[in-house]
Image (cartoon, coloured by chain):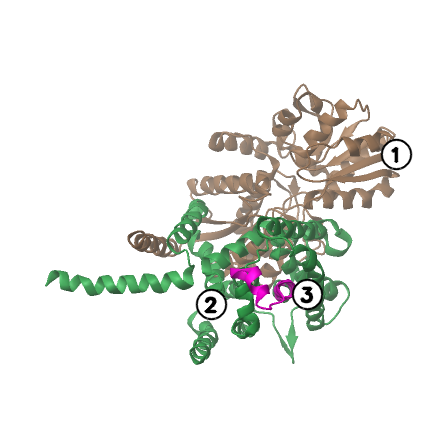
Amino acid sequence: MNREVYKFLVLVAIVLLCPLAVHEGYILNVLVFVGIHTMLALALNLLLGYAGQISLGQAGFFGLGAYISGILTATHGVNPWLAMGEGAVVVTLLAFLIGFPILKLKGHYLAMATLGLGIIIYIVFNEAVDQTGGPSGLSGIPNLSLGGIIFDNDLKNYYLIWTFVLLSMGLALNLVHSRIGRALRAIHDSEVAARVMGVNARLLKVQIFALSAGLSAVAGSLYAHTMTFVAPASFGFNFSVELVTMVIIGGLASIYGSLLGAALLTLLPELLRAFQDYDIIVYGLLLIIMTMYMPGGLVKGVPALFSAIRSRLKRKPSAHA
Amino acid sequence: MKRLLLPIITFALLSIWAGSCLAASTIKIGALFSVTGPPSFLGEPERNSAKMVVDEINAKGGIKGKKLELVVYDTQGDATKAVQAANRLIKEDKVVAIIGPSTTGESMAVLSVAEKEGIPLISCAAGSKITDPVKKWVFKTAQNDGLAVTKIFEHLNKRKINKVAILTVSDGFGASGREQLKAHAAKFGIQIVVDDTYGPKDTDMTSQLTKIRGSQAQAIVCWGTNPGPAVIAKNVKQLGIKLPLYMSHGVSSKKFIDLAGDAAEGIILPSGRVIVADVLPASDKQKKSLVAFVKDYQKHYKAEGDHFGGHAWDAIMLLKGAIERGGDTPAAIRDQLEKTRGFAGIGGIFTYNTADHAGLAKDAFVLVQVRNKDWALVK
């Protein structure tokens, strides 16, 4: 447990110092999105990585959080923090209610059901034009503010969002190292065995599903208030798939893996812009290579890569001697 | 994989480095188009046209001796990606102006970035709310949907039709069209007796059309982009509905006639002049630009230039005009853009002023009819 605390403190230090290293305003802007995506990947990882339940509808919960915050503040003039809280509560409750019937399903069927859920939410964003502004979006969402500080530039948003990221990572780390975390992993390995051991598998699955949705909704609110604009295209099925990819590339059942996956998938397209029209092909190839050679995700693959390089470097001089 | 990874990373870093070291004596213009994703039918011709016209300007020696450099990013129709790319254009590539994005949603998202950073933005999307109310740094080239609606309603008035059914697609384009149709109807004494929608991927609209057949409607106005409207045209024919069928400028390309086949005959729609460039009278002020654009596009891309590409062509030419008249700093470009008067482009004749950053009047559209598998002007 002590090592965990050190690891986390190192991360906090990196997050705090990062803006000093990057002067380019635009990188900071990308890091803001890395933060939002990390929260989403983390939320999904609790469900997918730890409890072993897939959801292809995460973008829907993310969108619900963003739209509830957006509509309440832009149309009804509610305080942004209050709107964020309301969004989180409403989405958590909604997921809790939907979770009971949906999480009876397993494997492909669960994937189908959550996919359907995500698509329904997406259609509502598009069709409820009077409320959501329809396909061309909802604008005029205010920035968050705290004691006179308005979070209206990249630097301020960076610290705002990464505070939330660190809080949710701390929460997740605590959760997975508790009795609940062990119970979740037990469900992941064998639900029957977990139930035999006295774990209320059904309730726990629904609870983690609701927590995952609620956390996604908070990320959605943060997104809405930093972008000050939301449109349905950002919350489609593609984005749900991208989130699953982040979790798998980063490392299933790893809190830090969620961060790595989100960072890689958000930064990679920016780096690959140099390939211009071929960036999508290179992006796809890299993903294929990574899943082939790093099945445990970046969190296991990168240390393995380093130790392989180190052992090779050690071997070389002896070969010459 | 270890052997592969290193060269890949080195190559990526090298190309990024090479990209940022290009000569500084150029004028950098940013472009945001959804080259892929659902709105790629807009983004692709827009990017092609922008590249084409920039190459031409450079071949003729650039603007005031400086070459133009176009930096294009694909936004995939997603507002998040558009905002990220806009930030990158402004803060990393240090462009002096941005053209695009392709859709109204993306434009609404990006315009706050342009406003905050003080970079002129010329959107290629149609939504009237982009420039209404007027924003200091934001202009647009695509014709407002309201202008297209006005053209159709004027024609309906002429034919003494006052009860219509509207059938709009449930995406950004259709939603904006529906809003404008409903907003303008009363002014022309037109009553909308059926107001129905269809999904962008629907393949059969007979149920909506059956409902329309049983109504009081004297004409049908359909608002969508390919392929939906072609399906509607075919369904109308199959059901033997004899009502006049009006479409939007969303289908004003040859592709629609190809898709709808015989069912397209007789359909009337408002369109930019580009599809009827060759039959326009020589007195038409836009004819020169239009013919040049169509010919060039054919030469470069072996395809028919459409009015979507025209939006990007107009945006670059407007920037060229502004830079020629003033300096090439963002503020100078903005001030000169606002002073654009009577520029005859592809979308129409642009005249911007402090109260109007859309710049077009209703004569930006002409009514065309499909006759013998080709477009004909409706007098």
Circle 1 or circle 3, nearest the eye: 3
Query: Is residue A214 on the magenta stretch?
Result: yes
Could you say where residue B92 lies in the image, as x and y percent from the top left?
Answer: 46, 60
Q: Distance between the residues labelled 1 and 2?
A: 64 Å
Q: Cβ–Cβ below 8 Å for labels 2 and 3? A: no
Q: Tag 1's secondary structure? A: loop
Q: The brown chain is which one?
A: B
Q: What secondary structure is the stretch in magenta mostly built from?
A: helix
Q: Mark 3 points at which residue?
A: A92
**Magenta stretch, residue numbers:** A188-216
Residue B48, percent from left and from top: 51, 39
Specify the label residue A256 is tagged with: 2
Residue B153, how many percent across, how many down? 81, 36
Q: Residue at x 86, y 39 (%)?
A: B188
**Which hue belongs to chain A?**
green
Which numbered marker is on residue B162?
1
Say few, some or many: other residues with alpha carbon within 10 Å of mark 2 (under 14 / 14 to 19 / 20 or more).
many
Q: In the displayed structure, would residue A267 be above or below residue B271?
A: below
* Residue B56 shown in magenta: no
What's the CA distance linking mark 1 and mark 3? Answer: 50 Å
Instruction: Please say if A97 is above or below A151.
Output: above
